[in-house]
Amino acid sequence: ISDPGSTNTTAMWYESDFYGGISLGFEKWQAGLTYTSYLSPNNSFGTVKELALNLELDDAAFWQDHLFGDISLSPHIVLAFELSGQADGGASEGTYFEFGIEPGLPLDTGEITFSFPISLGLSLNDYYENGTDMDDTFGFFEVGILATLPLGTADGYGDWELSGGLKLVNLGTYLEQLNHSDGSQLIGTGGFSIGF
């Protein structure tokens, strides 16, 4: 959301993220642990290192058992800890919490799937702070629509998938300040993935 330009340099490369993790599945549950290093090549912020825990539930079978058809809510939670650095310019490492759902609805053709991701991001402690006495609990609320189209399986090259969507993000007080006093943003997304 932030302006990709910087007063520190003429470079336009605002952010680059490096991450690695592990994910474990058990029946309908998926748990993950991810380490991320957030870098800013144009020096808009210092390097931030973060560890995140996430838990997701595949609830499609529950809705099918209750005669609601092929729908799902796919709830998830994320708990993240800043290990070093603070992208928000605060004075101490913070803790982040997120809760979200992603209701899904396949078309009759069985090809394109639409989902409607909804997420709430919160600061449990010093995650959205400005280095003084501000610790804004409410970070953001976002709602969107995402379309996913499977492209099939290529021999030896995995499952290919194309996706695209729109989301509307409403920012909390501090993030709105960082975003040049603009509290709402409409963001377009697009992606291509290969799964093995």
Image (spheres, rainbow, N blue to C red):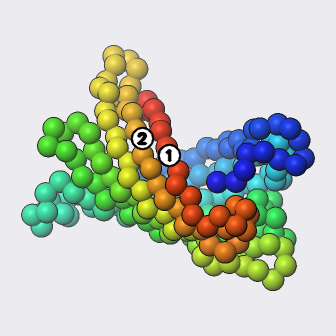
With respect to residue 62, does 1 lie above or below?
above
- The residue positioned 38% from the left and 52% from the top of the image is 145
- Under mark 1, the amino acid is Gly
User: x, y (%) of residue 112?
Assistant: 26, 39
Q: How far from the left and from the top, in percent, is residue 49?
A: 74, 54
Q: What residue is shown at x 84% (from left), y 73% (from top)?
A: 131
Mark 2 sits on what residue? 164
For the residues marked 2 and 1, what is the alpha-carbon distance in whole angstroms? 8 Å
Q: Is residue 56 visible?
A: no
Q: Residues within 10 Å of mark 2 (few under 14, many from 20)?
A: some
Label 1 belongs to which residue? 188
State which quarter of the image contains the N terminus. Answer: bottom right
User: Which percent across, then down, holds residue 132?
Assistant: 84, 79
Q: Please, what secondary structure does the residue beneath circle 2 have? A: strand
Q: Is residue 137 above or below residue 34?
A: below
Residue 33 at x, y percent in the picture: 56, 54
